[in-house]
Image: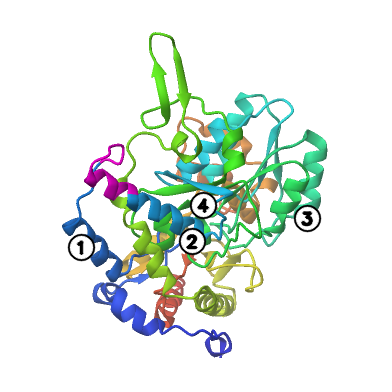
Amino acid sequence: MLARAMQPTDAIDFAALRASEFARLDTAGIAYLDYAASALYGASQARAHGDRLAHGIFGNPHSEHLASRHSAAAQAAARAATLAFFDADPDIHDVCFTANATAAIKLVAESYRFSLRRGLILSADNHNSVNGIGEFARRAQAPVSVLPLDTELRLDRGSASLRASVERQGEGLFAFPQQSNFSGVLHDLSLIEEARALGCDVLVDAAAAGPCGGLSLREHSADFVACSFYKLFGLPTGVGALIAKKSALARLRRPWFSGGTVEFVSVAHGRHCLKTGHEAFEDGTPNFLDLAAIESGFAFLARMPRTGLRAHIQSHTQHFLTLAATLRHRNGAPLVRLYGPRDMEQRGGIVAFNVLRNDGCVLPYERVEWLAREHGVAIRGGCFCNPGAAEKAFGFDALGVERCFDKLEGSFSIEAFRSCVGPAATVGALRLSVSTPTTHNDIERAVALIVACGE
């Protein structure tokens, strides 16, 4: 009933797509449910990129010969496709290619003008790549504040908390994820406009939003957006991007220069002049062979209208949430503890959960991961590099765990931490995430795994 109720108007034959592009999953017998960690590339993407490499001649784009021009053209096409995906006006926004989303975030962090009067505001729900910006802010003695989460792991009165932080510490950089990589919560993008109206610059981490994220920079004009292409379409890895307003890039001050970023350098006189725009932020030789795969990756996504893909993801996520909530031990105790929203209101295709013993205690996530591998189910365990959401989900803010951090500093391990906080504490969770190739059978296999864990 759920799947029928959510059929898209611009329907996509996902079964045919699975058979033609992702048949290797069925051949290997793998129920891949870890798309928040990495998307899977389609077979046609791999063929297209292989043909491009086999027949093309690509050289370092910092030259003027034909092979160099081929690489430069591929970069230009990738830049244009990235701007189009994020619905960004090329007269307003630019694209800086990086190694990944983390490197894109660091470009902003190391170059932002933090000061005593210009600080940092973070949501508690952030990947560590964003949390790490705080180290640059603290080094500049800038104020840092964190917006809290509610019991559904959404921002708790996000607008009011943001305004209170700005009133308390002044303008600065506000950074939050489009979609939580822990809970799947889709945060309110209107916070972009609210923060900018308060005088803040805004950094949006779009890495976990996936291929149907739908961030329009014409509608929500963030100053900076970070992404990784393998999270969108699997191939290539090792390439990300900072999509930035040209005016925002001009306000950054890079703490160093490197090959490819300068107009001139004088060793004798200790002077240099940075290039303008993206060229000032793309250090060294770009990953020009993998950049050539980006255009075909976006072309692959274009075969799937976002509304249809979004409905597909919502249908499978809702199916898992519904089944997981009904699972019980023989004594009637729940088998699953879900974290975050229980329905599909403002959430994406990521679900965090734990398997419970019949006495209500959490089965260590490492045990479930091991059993999942044995069952051919690909899910992830841990805190997913998102300590803020994890701490709220597990109640660490009420457990007084700081003594354990002090005790274990320099010799930290999950086992030692679990021993320190005590048997009643939850340390880590499981994460299931769905995308284009996901099938009903994949979800059923994940549920069967959970049932097996409880036996």
Please report whichever mark, 3 or 4, sits nearer to the chain's N-terminal start. Answer: 3
What residue is shown with label 4?
A: 383
Three-letter code, disc 2: Leu
- Magenta stretch: give its range: 60-72
SS at badge 3 = loop
Q: Nearer the viewer, mark 2 or mark 3?
A: 3
Picture layout, residue 418 above or below residue 181: above
Q: Would residue 24 appear left or right of 163 to someone viewing this image?
A: left
Reply yes or no: does residue 69 show up in magenta.
yes
Circle 4: residue type: Cys
Q: On residue 51, which mark appears?
A: 1
* Colour logic: rainbow
What residue is rendered at 48% in x and 43% in y? 104
Can residue 330 be seen in this snapshot? Answer: no
* Res 430 label: 2
Q: Residue at x 57, y 38 (%)?
A: 249
Residue at x 56%, y 86% (from the top left corner) = 2
- Residue 344 is a magenta residue: no
Nearest-to-viewer mark from 2 and 1: 1
Q: Secondary structure at mark 2?
A: strand
Q: Which residue is mark 3?
A: 157
Three-letter amino acid code at the position of disc 1: Asp
In space, the residues marked 4 and 1 are separated at their CA atoms by 39 Å
Up/down of 30 relative to 241, above or below:
below
User: Label 3 sits on what residue type?
Assistant: Arg
